[in-house]
């Protein structure tokens, strides 16, 4: 298992590979052929969102406990929506919440990073199209979601998709602990074995509808325990084997 980070490199960025705490330069193409180069110090680096996806395909109500919490019936097939690429931020960046919009919620999620162009992928081949796994905070303006009856506005604000801190490559996603902390207090704590639709099933289902491109993200849904975040809060999404994605909350100007 290795973890791939994208870090600031002057005005540009570069990828590094972490194994057991040691960082090495990734030489080549993350989505093609690459090798491990020279060691790089991990201290003092600015870690960026690991990918810049063309789209984030999100799954609603994919944990039994969250569907019950929201008072909604279990979906017979995946309920999908898209967060725009412009909502992506990286670790340490600020989530800017519109103070006029009512309640804003955190949603801790395990996310899939697509490794190669995927269209009509059979279930048995789904894992071949996955580069690795990361964390997403599916930040949601809950009052607007309920008011609108669909998700484009409530989940599509700039900064409403923190992603990171890395891509865990070779990590088995079937039973990982997914947690959310707000100001150090545990708010969500579940495991991916509670997912209604599994990682391979989601890749297959979505790729039958739309082509997934390298770097695209599928966010697999959130467990129970969603709740409000307000300016001044610090919110951390932690998925076992991947790491911690921490962001502060500020008022949107
Ligand atoms: Mg969600």
Image: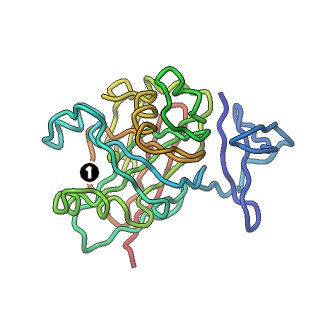
Q: Residue at x 53, y 47 (%)?
A: 216
Tell me residue 19's x, y (percent).
Answer: 71, 33
Q: Quadrant of the N terminus?
A: top right
Quarter-wise, where is residue 84 in the image? bottom left
Read off the residue under disc 1. Answer: 227
Q: Residue at x 35, y 40 (%)?
A: 221
Tell me residue 52's x, y (percent).
Answer: 58, 55
Element type at marker 1? strand
Q: Residues within 10 Å of mark 1 (few under 14, many from 20)?
A: some
Tell me residue 74's x, y (percent).
Answer: 19, 33
Q: Nearer the viewer, residue 250 or 155?
A: 155
Mark 1: is the Cβ under 8 angstroms from ligand 1? no
Q: Nearer the viewer, residue 249 or 109?
A: 109
Q: Quadrant of the C terminus?
A: bottom left
Q: Residue at x 77, y 37 (%)?
A: 33
Query: What colour-coding does the image apply?
Result: rainbow
Q: In the figure, is residue 189 to the left or right of 91?
A: left
Tell me if residue 246 comes above or below residue 10 in the rendering. above
Quarter-wise, where is residue 154 in the image? bottom left
Q: Residue furthest top?
A: 124
């Amino acid at each position: 298992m290795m973890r791939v980070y994208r870090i600031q490199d002057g005005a540009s960025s570069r990828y590094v590979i972490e194994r057991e705490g040691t960082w090495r330069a990734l030489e080549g193409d993350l989505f093609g052929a690459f090798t491990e180069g020279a060691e790089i110090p991990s201290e003092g680096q600015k870690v960026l969102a690991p990918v810049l996806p063309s789209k984030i395909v999100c799954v609603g109500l994919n944990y039994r406990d969250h569907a019950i919490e929201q008072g909604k019936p279990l979906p017979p097939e995946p309920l999908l929506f898209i967060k725009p690429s412009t909502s992506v931020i990286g670790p340490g960046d600020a989530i800017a919440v519109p103070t006029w919009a009512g309640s804003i919620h955190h949603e801790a999620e395990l996310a899939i990073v697509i490794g190669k162009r995927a269209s009509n992928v059979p279930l048995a081949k789904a894992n071949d199209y996955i580069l690795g796994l990361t964390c997403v905070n599916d930040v949601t303006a809950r009052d607007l979601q309920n008011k609108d009856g669909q998700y484009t506005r409530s989940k599509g604000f700039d900064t409403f998709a923190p992603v990171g801190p890395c891509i865990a490559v070779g990590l088995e996603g079937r039973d990982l602990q997914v947690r959310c902390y707000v100001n150090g207090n545990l708010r969500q704590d579940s495991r991916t074995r509670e997912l209604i639709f599994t990682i391979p099933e989601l890749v297959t289902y979505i790729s039958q509808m739309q082509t997934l491109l390298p770097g695209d993200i599928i966010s697999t849904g959130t467990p129970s325990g969603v709740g409000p975040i307000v300016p001044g809060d610090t919110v951390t999404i932690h998925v076992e084997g991947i790491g911690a994605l921490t962001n502060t909350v500020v008022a949107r100007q």
